[in-house]
Amino acid sequence: MTGHQGYLGTVMAPTLLAAGHDVVGLDTGLFAGSVLGPEPDDPPSLVRDLRDVTVDDLTGFDAVIHLAALSNDPLGSLVPELTYDINHHAASRLARLAKEAGVGRFLYASTCSVYGASGTDQALTEEAPMRPVTPYAESKVRVEDDLVALADDDFTPVMLRNATAFGFSPRLRCDIVLNNLCAHAVLDHRILVTSDGSPWRPLVHAADIATAFAEALVAPREAVHAQAFNIGSDANNVQVTQIAEAVAQAVPGAELLITGETGGDPRSYRVDFAKVGAALPQWTARWSIADGAAELVDAYRRLGMTHDAFARRFTRLTWLRQRQEQGELDEAMRPVGQDRR
């Protein structure tokens, strides 16, 4: 599993272990210290930048789950060349090496943001046109194309297009919408939406993403081979205003402000989730947005979320800039002094 020390990987690794799999992580540790609460118990791992992976690193594994990425739209827009280098070129190279090493199944963490500026309120199936509006989403589209081209009788890529994630993870992110609004509500007693609140966003809990990957890992080949699946639920197809209102319910007394100063976000899309239900009948998205908001609010209060941690530790762009300023990362987002074997 690449990116096992990230927001999703920290939740997914225990899920896979509980399902009886042997899990080995691969991570360069960019976000290993972004922890709220007790340190997570990581699986055995290779300390390796994705761009330095070799075929020997992958030999002997039955499957690869690829989560690692620069997973933030503002970060991707700030350094688009790195986004394409890591999120596209290194990801596609990883898949080619995995195939060469004899890996049979390759699960890829894609995103529903590939639909981008959909231009419609109709729920989009996996066959809908992809209209990415950020380098991050564009890189995902390119990798999906590359993976389909690699598919053959011995190599099964599966593209899981996750809806926008939410929910608690020990390696927290506060730069995704529900997690962000809950933090503001707890810390400032204010829920601020600067758009007009109209864009559609499908959401899915990190734990539900983990179980979807666990099911895709063992699904019959014919059910998933070289296919893309939207990961989420119809119930969590909501507008930004509805997300903010769920946060207001979780934090009574917090002031809800929808200013509209930035207008309508061009990234607006509703997503159809019927296909994954048919292919992975044992899987369902169990977490509602309301339950996720309650979970986050409880965790923030119980584990002592602070303004400083929110701004500096759990916001991806700020965290990486801070590590660069401290000389821990170079301009290419590589840890200084780390072995590149």
Image: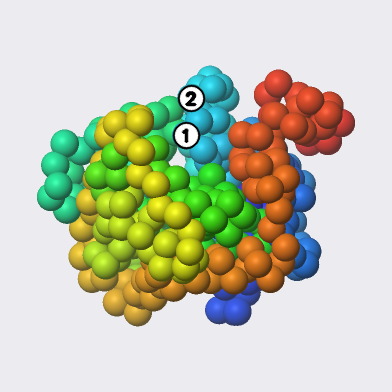
Whether pointer 2 and pointer 1 mark residues with C-beta atoms closer than 8 Å, the reply is yes
Question: What is the crowding at mark 1: few (fewer than 14 residues within 10 Å), some, or many (at least 20)?
Answer: some
Please state if 173 lies on the left or on the right of 143 as rendered.
Answer: right
Which residue in the structure is indicated by mark 2?
77
Q: Can residue 131 be seen in this view?
A: yes
Hey, what amino acid is under mark 2? Answer: Ser
Which residue in the structure is indicated by mark 1?
73
Please state if 23 lies on the left or on the right of 189 as rendered.
Answer: right
Please give the name of the residue rendered at 83% of the width and 29% of the height, measured from the top-left corner: 326
Hey, what amino acid is under mark 1? Answer: Asp
Q: Nearer the viewer, residue 212 or 153?
A: 212
In which image quadrant can residue 163 be found?
bottom left
Please give the name of the residue rendered at 43% of the width and 61% of the height, measured from the top-left corner: 247
In which image quadrant can residue 194 be found?
top left
Q: Name the quarter where the C terminus is drawn.
A: top right
Q: Position of residue 88 (x, y in %)?
A: 48, 32
